[in-house]
Image: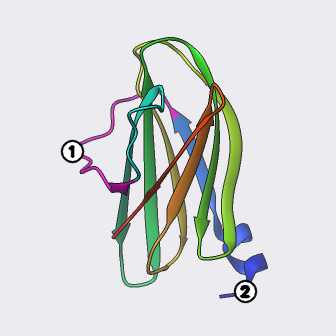
Amino acid sequence: MPHRMLRSAAIALLTSAPLLAAAPAHAAPQRDFPCAVGLQKVDSTLTSTVTLSVQCGETRTVSVRITAGSTELLSLQETVQANVRQTVTVTVPRVPQVCATLEADEQTTMVCTP
């Protein structure tokens, strides 16, 4: 799908509500990353809804980049309050896989949906 179409169709919502029953996605080892991260993708006939959750033990600034292949769907930097799970949801035209790359305190991790 064209990059412009994906970007224009993306809708991002940031909340402090807990993520409901999100199964952890495949991830690189996170032992050095200072926050817990979960990624979930739910497909309908035409769209994919991607939800990323982040929770840190201390207040941290976290940079997030969500991609589908080489197309960037969302890029943001957010302050995550200590012990508060924050979520970001993006709805885009259906994609087979998405990955989220996060950086905090000079540590980076990547999670991808199966």
- Label 2: which residue? 2
- Label 1: which residue? 21
- Residue 19 within the segment the image draws in magenta: yes
The residue lying furthest to the bottom in this view is 1
Q: Position of residue 94 (x, y in %)?
A: 48, 80
Separation (CA) of disc 1 from disc 2: 32 Å
The amino acid type found where label 2 is placed reads Pro
Q: Position of residue 49 (x, y in %)?
A: 44, 63
Which of the two residues, 108 or 114, is positioned nearer the viewer here? 108
**Residue pictured at 28% horizontal, 50% vertical:** 24
N-terminal-most mark, 1 or 2: 2
Magenta stretch, main secondary structure class: loop
Near mark 2 (Cα within 10 A), the count class, few <14, some 14-19 or many ≥20, is few
The residue lying furthest to the right in this view is 4
Which of the two residues, 88 or 9, is positioned nearer the viewer here? 88
**Magenta residues, start to end:** 15-27
Q: Position of residue 32 (x, y in %)?
A: 46, 31
**Residue pictured at 41% horizontal, 52% vertical:** 28
In the picture shown, does residue 112 fall above or below 104? below
